[in-house]
Amino acid sequence: MRYLLRRAVFFVLTLWACITLNFLLPRLMPGNPAIALLAKFHGRLNPAALKAIEIALGVNVHQSLVSQYGAYLHNLATGNLGVSITFFPDSVSSVIRGAILYTLGLVGVTTIIAFIVGTLIGIIGAWRRGGWLDSLLPPIFVIFTAIPPFWVGMLLILVFGIQLHWFPYDFAYDPTLTPSLTLPFIGNVIEHSILPAIALLVTSIGGWILTMRNTMITTLADDYVKMARAKGLPSRRIMLDYAARNAILPNLSGFAMSIGFVVSGAVLVEYVFNYNGLGYLLVQALDSEDYPLMQALFLLITVAVLIAILLADIVTVVLDPRTRAAR
Amino acid sequence: MAMIFEAAAAQTAGQLPGATEPGSGGNAGQAIGRMWKAIRSNGKALTGSVLLALFVLLALFPWAIAKDNPSAEIYKPTLGPSTAHLFGTTSYGQDIFAQAVWGTRETLIIAVVSGVLSTILSVIMGLAAGYLGGAWDSVLNFITDVLLVVPTFPLLIIIVAYLPKVGVPGLIAVLVITGYSYGARQLRAQTLSVRSRDYLEAARVRGERRFYVIMVEIIPSMTSLIVATFLGTAVYNVLAAAGLQFLGFGDPSSVSWGTMLYWAENNEALQTGQYLWAIVPGALIALLGAAFVLINYAFDEISNPALARVPITRTRQLNPILRRLGANRSG
Amino acid sequence: MRTDQAEWLDASWAEQSGGPILEVRDLSVCYHTKRGDVLAVDDVSFDLARGEFLGIVGESGCGKSTLLFGIAQLLSPPAAITGGSVRFEGTNLVDLNDHQLASIRWKKLSLVMQSAMNALNPVKTISAQFTDAMRAHGVTSRQEIADRSAEVLRMVGIDPQHLRSYPHQLSGGMRQRSMIAMALLFTPDLVIMDEPTSALDVVAQRSLMIQIKELQQRLGFAVIFVTHDMSLVSHFSDRLMVMYAGQVAELGATRLVFDSPRHPYSSGLLDAFPSIRGPKVDLTGIPGSPPDLARPPSGCRFAPRCPVVVDACQEQPVELRHVGDVLVRCIRPEGNGVVRGD
């Protein structure tokens, strides 16, 4: 449990560091560009929202840095993230709420599929050294990781969208429909997410394959695998229960890193497909200098990644009894 | 995803052509020589190196291949490919082929310069944390870990959003700061494991100063890990830079593959049938990234021979060898 | 003998021991490396009788572990068997594939490795590891599995409550012993042991050896015990084999080999282990190092380091010959009749 405790402490500390970074960034930049912007909106925002933005961006405040920080934290805790400039007068939180599920779906599902399929290919490839699974797939997919995901998206749009008309390639759902929890709408969303998902999948799966394959190969040389053979256990059981079960442990910590990469790739992929998720919002906010929205999005994305990492740590504790040892 | 090789490199850094046991600084030279020989014999490494060499040539002598000025808007716009214009022209009447060739320079400069600087930063942060230990380690390591965990592209966006137009140097600076963390972590781990080895104790007892120990004893033993870090960071930088330029950062008026994509997207190249404008720069980025990845992949195999392609040994195959060895055995 | 215990003893134990259970003939194992092919085991032949305890000793790199895994058909690339046969109870194991070997593995032939920390799956409990061995061989009743698991643990002196433990939760000695218990699940005819005591301290080593010997005498299985510690194994083995550079250097009854080693290498090995009692003698080692097996010397392989070498030794390779009741690979065994009192 010490392990989990350490990871939880790291989670809290990193969260604090990101919140503080978010707070400091606008104040560190030469000539706060937010000032001019807010002057424009001064009369049209309700006072609470205006105050929140000013605190968040360090504009027009006559308090000390410390009390600003306190106010900023308070706003965060109460969900008062200010008002979006792009989508004026909608609040930042409502704008985010409208987009978060799409990104969660896209990134979440893609990561899970990439993880499962990539890990399986890595396991089987390492088990049957020299087969086509081992010689062809890993190098090909590893090379794919060097391809910009947004460019793959563009290719997919070109081939499957524009030329073949097989899949839609604009927005997260048909703009003529209204979002609802009905089956046809969900089906429509899924349809719209296929091409972006493929772009993300193809460029991220290589990492999973390679790391799993490499740790698997090292594990296969371990004595307990030899012992399992000596015991006359069936091949599949050795591969899964003895080798893979141990090989996957170091990969779980790699999960943390790769989530960051997939999220990063998703920003531009969403942009290319006009997929209205958080990444698309981020780029829009960038274009219109919507600092409140940008800040909030950055924080949210970071928190999501941290949570995913913590989940991976929990899974590690479940799978590896050595981490539960009292030390 | 591009950084995955460094984990493997770290695992095996002790057993490679690049890593050597105790001694003096001459090891780095020997190590590189051995690595070079190993690269030449591996198919993937060779392909990657050839590709990289081609790009370097293009970057150094673009005028030899493309005669046109890439920014000159002197041609008829939106032409398709032809013998005069290999990839056609942009909406502004520029020759796409010229842009692609001349754009190599800026892209490569960004990749290499930020790669080198990032690696240097990784070495400093990683070694310092690992070697100095104690409070230094905790603080430096924490900073690195946070930067590692934070998704880098959103962070990049936030930073460049607040900066006034900074152009390419600013781009490089930002890439270096966000990209050094993975390498730093691997190097720190390696430093920690190497720190307790006897030959370092011997150096300390001899009275060598810390700086000497670091430069002459530790760094040469991690040559391969450092090279792997550089290659991984280079790929990351190519992709991240392309992404940022695609969004309009850096200097959109300069010619590089990323800015080509920016203008292509802004002029709806795909929708208006100007496919090459969008496809060519992306393909080149992919090829450059692939070159680094191939070299890195092969490097991985070289340092850990267990990972290399194994021919399936059949007993019958070995009998001729047996016969050769057993020439003077009876029966 | 309780009835349920009787069920677990292999049917063949009831037979009268007629003939050896293991016949190794001209076994050779080669490592196919980039530098060249290394013949790690070169034409090794020996028999093993039912219930016999054979010790194999030699320095690191002499091929003893490779020989062991070659016999058990557990070699991995780049190592492979390149010649010879391993007849276990009549069947040549070298010809069989994994599927055919499965019915022999563990039921008749089991393995104990050097480090239990590495040989036991770190993420499974002891009980789970016992269980999957039994399930793989057709034992399905949960009760039977539980009973037998507890029984073998008690045999090695471990409280069955530790079935629920993970390997890292046990002490080193307990781990080794549970590994031995696991090897005895089906009371096999032959247990192969690769330096099972090397990872333990001196006291634990001895108590483990005594326990192994006791189990062996009680249950009647044969043992091939590989170690670098000649003096340790000589108290327990029936026969002793000394290996050098992939070949058998000396093979014979323990008392004969240990008390009066014929091969200069064997006596060199013995001299390297001083006895605790007896007169003080100067410590001597064996100068030089083992030959590079990728390019073995023509002639006797020990010649470069041999204290009694003559020209004839390096002219052609030496065969194993009988000297009294012992097999020796030396043309000058007479020069080494040093009797050791211990």
Image (cartoon, rainbow, N blue to C red):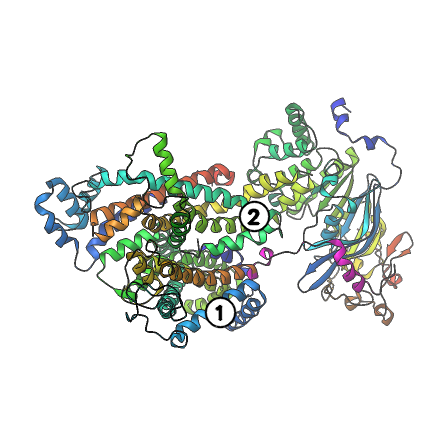
Return the chain for callout 2: A
Quadrant location of the C terminus of chain B? Answer: bottom right
Q: Is residue C201 left or right of residue B259?
A: right
Which kind of residue does numbered mark 1 sit on? Arg
Residue A307 position by quadrant:
top left
Q: Is residue A173 left or right of residue C202?
A: left
Q: Position of residue A319 (x, y in %)?
A: 50, 38
Neighbours of disc 1 within 10 Å: few (<14), some (14-19), many (20+): few
**Residue corresponding to mark 2:** A216
Q: Position of residue C110 (x, y in %)?
A: 72, 40
**Residue corresponding to mark 1:** B206
Q: Is residue A179 above or below residue C119?
A: above
Which kind of residue does numbered mark 2 sit on? Met
Is residue B245 in the magenta section?
no
Observer-nearest of B83 and A302: B83
Q: Is residue A204 left or right of residue C110?
A: left
Q: Position of residue A249 (x, y in %)?
A: 50, 44
Disc 2 is placed on an element classified as helix
Q: Which residues are magenta?
A: B302-330
